[in-house]
Amino acid sequence: MENNMKDIVNLCQNRWFVYAGSEIYGWLANTWDYGPYGSQLKENIRNLWLKEFVQKRTDMVTLDAGILMNPQVWVASGHVGGFSDPLIDDKNTGERFRADKLLEDLIDSSDDAGEYLKEKYGVNSLIPEAWELAKQTEVMRGEQVKNPETGKPGDWTDAKKFNLMFQTSQWVTADSSSVIYMRPETAQGIFVNFANIARTSRKKIPFGVAQVGKAFRNEITPGNFIFRTREFEQMEIEYFCEPGTDMEIHKTWKNDCMKFLTQTLSISEDNLKLRDHDDDELSHYSNATTDIEFRFPFGWGELWGIASRTDFDLKAHMAQSKEDLSYFDPVNNKKYVPYVIEPSVGLTRLFLATICNAYTVEEVRTYLKLDPKIAPVKVWVLPIVKKLWEEAKKVYAQLSEDFVCEYDEVGSVGKRYARMDEIGTPFCVVIDSDNYDAGNITVRHRDSMEQEIVPIEQLNSYLTGKLK
Ligand code: GAP
């Protein structure tokens, strides 16, 4: 697949999807702000996720927990002790990298690189993240791995663990403060509220809790535009179930997540694949994890992690807080600590995937073939000539009752079509006097570029049908 990432980033920046953060101050590297169309697209994706996974189900509720939490939460969850990536510096330049990522690139650099490394260094997996730090250092030096920025072999320090949590401090008294953390995942807000939700929601296991919100990680190598950032949004579900039912429910969630991507968001199946984690790759809390990977222009990358988290988190919080988080199951008359299945997707990463999936280059135009349901603007209203602005504004008023619309009278009709195509607007309505006087309007379709005459009074219901 061609790496057209640069063109996609340009389109996002020029067409009001994403701006460089704090741009007038020369940017704060790897921070991004979501512009008028970007924030709308993000909201549409979030709303569809909520609709599919909460509104349409009887076994789901939502939560909006705080970003700042008692630091004990992160001790119990293992983040204070273990949420780290292997950091390595090139002494020649002072640049920092993730050792495991550089080693992954080395393994991918040729068909036999993996076997060669296994034999020479005695590593028994091709997942460098699972290797001891000393082994990562040995291979980095032994293979004279290149610094990707300079293209020359680096003078590598020892690989060491770097904790990814963002620290801040909270003033306790006038002259003392205590360290607190910006949450690195939204999940823990759900675990610490499990007993509250079980008690007040009247849901019986199995049930799930969905949450959308910001998460922060001090990533060593953020990049690839909004793929990996230090501030991002997650959409997470913790689905609580009886121990022993976890594997079956894990399977169901994999299917449901794939269905959401392919059917609700219309992401092409060719751009998606499921990848099961090997045993030595599994997180400390997981007995099975599957990633849905997306074919980004720069290569396959994790989009959605579906982890079976056992009872690790609830038990860890029980031990740390001394509170009882077990559940009495009235159906089986049993008390147990529930197991958890966790489908977790980055909203901002999914945003990027939908744009990459929709980016379409044809001979005469480049456009975003977004599913109409997520398109930031549904209808673009344009008078064929400026003097029809009054009629066009009436049509705009009628349509904006039901849809996000845009009014545009500037430039030739062709240029206006090109603008709306690039933003992914599925429909354009054109006002010309002959049709308007006869009570009709022309609807132009983004994908086929075909035009259709529709009675003005039926326009809203006609478009509602098309947007379903
Ligand atoms: N609660 C589990 C959890 O946080 P994760 O695999 O670390 O698991 C889940 O993250 C999802 O969050 C990823 O699949 C990805 O979509 C998104 N994500 C993680 N780190 C990210 C980052 N630095 N920037 C953007 N999205 C990120």
Image (cartoon, helix red, strand yellow):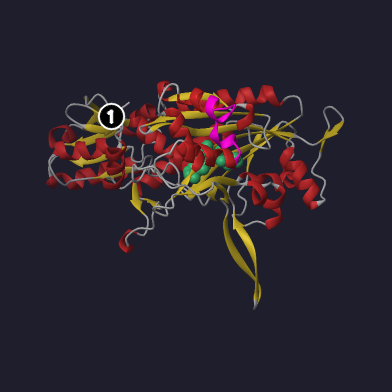
Q: Is residue 151 above or below residue 448?
A: below
Taking depth in this image into account, of 432 and 128 the one nearest to the observer is: 128
Tell me which segment is drawn in magenta.
119-133
Q: Quadrant of the C terminus?
A: top left
Is residue 291 something that shows in the picture? yes
Magenta span contains residue 124: yes
Taking the spot 20% from the left edge, 43% from the top edge, the residue there is 391
Q: How many marks?
A: 1
Q: Residues within 10 Å of mark 1 (few under 14, many from 20)?
A: some
Secondary element at tag 1: strand
Q: Is residue 323 above or below residue 135?
A: below
Magenta span contains residue 397: no
State left or right for residue 269 relative to residue 164: left
Taking depth in this image into account, of 322 and 81 the one nearest to the observer is: 81
Q: Quadrant of residue 360?
A: top left
State left or right for residue 5 relative to residue 213: left
Q: Is residue 362 above or below residue 87?
A: above
**Image location (x, y in percent) of residue 97:** 46, 46
Taking the spot 38% from the left edge, 54% from the top edge, the residue there is 29
Taking depth in this image into account, of 464 and 106 the one nearest to the observer is: 106
State left or right for residue 92 relative to residue 142: left
